[in-house]
Amino acid sequence: MKMTKIYEGSHQWIMFGRDENKPANIIDSNQYAVRTANRCLLLDPGGSELFAPMMAAVLHHAPVEHITDLFASHQDPDVISSLGLWDQALSGAKLHAPAIWEGFLRHFGCESIEYVPIPDNGGTIKLESVELQLIPAHYLHSSGNFHVYDPQAKILMSGDVGTALEAPGAPMFVENFDLHIEKMRYFHQRWMPSNQAKRAWIERVRSLEIDILAPQHGRVFKGNDVKRFLDWFDALQVGIAV
Amino acid sequence: MNNQTKSQFVAVASITSELSAVMVVAKEISLAAANAKAIAFRAGDKAKGFQPITDFINELAKETIELVTSINVYALSLYQLTVNEFRKTNAYNKFELVAKMSKDAPYAQSMQQPLEHAKLSMELCQRQFKRDVKQLLDQLEAVMHHARAARVIAANSRIEASQAGEYLQSLQAVAESVDKAAHTIHDNVQRCRIALSLYRNS
């Protein structure tokens, strides 16, 4: 599992992904950690297949007892099917996840972790002095979906928005936006169901100051590529399967 | 999931299925008892010896239904325990893998506590599973007793039926159906016992 620090300031953002030992037939995913002095939040911590390499990688940055919070942008197995294992590894931790998915996510096993339901209009996660905003992203692609915005680090963890389907071992950052477009097009057209939802999200996100857009699959967008991505996504027709 | 875990899931799930068949048969016995009572009443003195037997048959059927109902609840909780054991064992195996993969990590040591806790939880589940299997086997043995008693009653019924004149055939049919039902219960419960006995001492 590769580990890349994408922000270092009063706190840190670490990206995990490109696990060389993952089974070939499961999609590669990016996991993120927000680390403060005594706490650690894992964003979309991954599927159960990825639990061991992910936990082993996190132990390079935080002890188990500092992992106090998990966040699941939505209910997909590549996002959070590891929940039942985190549930047995962590004590007194919280899972922040969409309210509408609570009854569904509990199927993965959630006995000791406290499920903190995120209402449809969003909320915040306070991690010591860091306050993260939970930005509604419903229907992008899940009917109950949130992204995480860090106003201090100016990072938007954007779940499936910004995803690219790539060959194993792809670089962590977008290097040439124009060449990257074809790796994103089909995913966004097929997985994202609603142009209306897309427009509402873009309007909301354009008002945020974003240096880094960090999706759950593929590469991370930095600097001007963030605006390029929003413009490209704005013009794209989605929901093509009907 | 390894083969032993798969077999354990199948064994526990099959108990509920076998027991629901036993329940159907026990209800059939109860119906046969009601039928026998009506025939014995019509036969009057000719089936005098048969009349108390019908009460026995009915009582036996009622007890079997009650017993199977309570065993079913137990079997469902055993299934839940199997799921828990699977989850705990899976977690322990994954945590062991984490410990192996994180040897050079600065915070590797912090995994020891969850690892030990997972091991204890897994072992506790395994012990409880064995205890519950033993108790379930004891309860199944009680159903076997009922099946054996039903066969004795069926044999007595045949003797009494032979003295019932023109009612002989009807009462013999009752005895046959009780005997057949007792066989079915015996066979189904025996299959449950064989499936479970593998796990009593595993």
Image: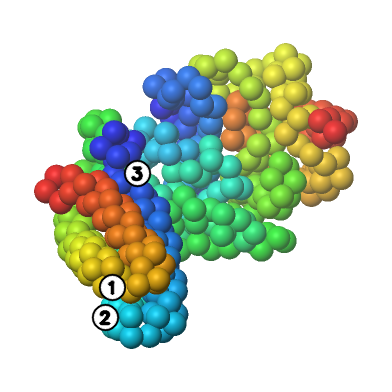
| Residue at the spot of label 3 | B10
Q: Of the residues shown, which amino acid type is indicated by label 1?
A: Gln
| Residue drawn where x is 65% and y is 47% of the image | A147
Q: Is residue A45 above or below residue A240?
A: below
Query: Residue under circle 2?
Result: B49
Residue at 70% x, 19% y is A183
Q: In this orientation, which residue lies closer to the viewer: B125 or A136?
A: B125
Q: If you read the primary sequence from the N terminus, does the residue marked by circle 3 or circle 1 appear first? A: 3
Left or right position of B181 against A121: left
State if disc 2 and disc 3 touch (CB < 8 Å).
Answer: no
Q: CA distance from mark 3 to mark 1?
A: 48 Å
In the rendered image, which quarter contains the C terminus of chain B?
Answer: top left
Q: Which chain does the numbered disc 1 sit on?
A: B
Q: State whether residue B153 is above or below residue A219.
A: below
Q: Residue at x 66, y 63 (%)?
A: A119
Q: Nearer the viewer, residue B68 or A105?
A: B68
The Cα atoms of the two marked residues, 2 and 1, are separated by 9 Å
How many callouts does the rendering have? Answer: 3
Q: CA separation, marks 3 and 2?
A: 46 Å
Identify the subunit bearing mark 2. B
Q: What residue type is disc 3 on?
A: Val
As drawn, the label of residue B163 is 1
Badge 2 element:
loop
- The residue mark sitting in front, 2 or 1, is 1
